[in-house]
Image (tube, rainbow, N blue to C red):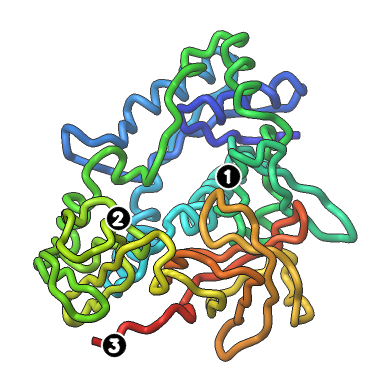
Amino acid sequence: MRAVVGLSGGVDSAVAALLLKRNGDDIAGMFMQNWEDDEPDSACRADEDRKDALAVCAKLGIPFHARDFASEYRERVFAHFLSEYRSGRTPNPDVLCNREIKFRTFLDAARELGAEKIATGHYARTTHEDGRYKLLRALDIEKDQTYFLHALDQEQLGAAVFPLGGLRKPQVRALAREAGFAVHDKKDSTGICFIGERDFRAFLSKYLPAQPGELRTPEGEVLGEHHGAMFYTLGQRAGLRIGGRAGSAGGPWYVVGKDIGMNVVYVAQGTQNRWLMSQNLRAQKVHWIAGVKPSLPLRCEAMVRYRQTPQTCEIEWADKGINVRFDEVQRAVAPGQSVVFYAGDECLGGGVIASTDAPEITP
């Protein structure tokens, strides 16, 4: 097999390359730069990651390639990210990045080098049955990344190799240590690359100027001031700056709604307060990995956030999308995020959450 491994400079992609090399495959490594940042304190650290990826290739004795996909990323991923926040929704850029950059732009670049396959350090598995490719959850459920891969199509899955799908993270680090990779104990990247460890609000405010506004209860009581309604996410607790109040129950406060037009953020007390709870959602831009729509209604499981335990539900057709009814009430289902469907270990696909049946705030 001739394959190009997407090397991020981290331990996971390094071990993916190691396993393919040991398997006797004809491989090369490619480092993708997906973001350009002129801030000296940027946490994206592309130069450092590039050097780490190059060192892995040198250790394995395989060719190293580097490609700059920053313009494609800004056009296909970041522009959508900003548009969603501007509209008051909370997007998930990793889903778009996988579909548009790591398994499209990268795949095209690999094919230009004569590769048949691309490999990444994602924790996922694939299989080919009955004439189609299936995406399966990884053995290590804590690291499983199929939630972020649900928008891939049959061509992309057919070209993808996930060497880490049957391993657990401690095994991956042990393999890296034994191979002499300097990245064996490198910290896992978290969050969004172009933001990194920087303050999210400060970063976003460079692109989406916002004005302070009122923090209100659903009943209309003003409790304080926020930095800009678009910066807040349903279910958010941190950064509200609301202390104890006379006559209140003393529990923590959470964001339960936003009015972007009025620049108001609504908050309420209690992890399970009614404003955060819903049992039905409507999803749009639904994608099915099999390439054909299933017969609905369909009983399956779904996740509305990464690392959530899949929840049993039923899917039905709806105008311009689908309705999802869960067997149990769900907490803090956020429009703009992904709902991803499963049948056991198989990821069926998913869509973008458009709305829920949480109580409507009508001040």
Residue 34 vertical position relative to residue 211 in the rendered view, above or below: above
Q: List x then y, in percent, for residue 357.
A: 48, 81
Residue 45 vertical position relative to residue 338 in the rendered view, above or below: above
Q: List x then y, in percent, for residue 159.
A: 69, 48
Q: Give residue 112's mark.
A: 1
Residue 267, image quadrant: bottom left
The residue singled out by tag 2 in the image is: 252
Q: Which residue is drawn at 28% across and 38% down?
A: 197
Callout 2 amino acid? Pro
Ranked by sequence position, the earlier of labels 1 and 3 is 1
SS for dot 2: loop
Taking the image as shown, residue 71 lies to the left or right of residue 175, namely left
Q: Give residue 192's mark.
A: none
The residue singled out by tag 3 in the image is: 362
**Mark-to-mark CA distance, 1 and 3:** 56 Å
**Mark-to-mark CA distance, 1 and 2:** 54 Å
Instruction: Please say whether residue 114 is visible from this viewpoint.
Output: no
Callout 1 amino acid? Glu
Residue 121 vertical position relative to residue 264 in the rendered view, above or below: above
Callout 3 amino acid? Thr
Tell which tag, 2 or 3, sits nearer the viewer.
2
Q: Which residue is drawn at 58% across and 83% down?
A: 321
Q: List x then y, in percent, for residue 249.
A: 28, 61
In the rendered view of the protein, which quadrant contains the N terminus? Answer: top right
Q: List x then y, in percent, for residue 10.
A: 48, 27
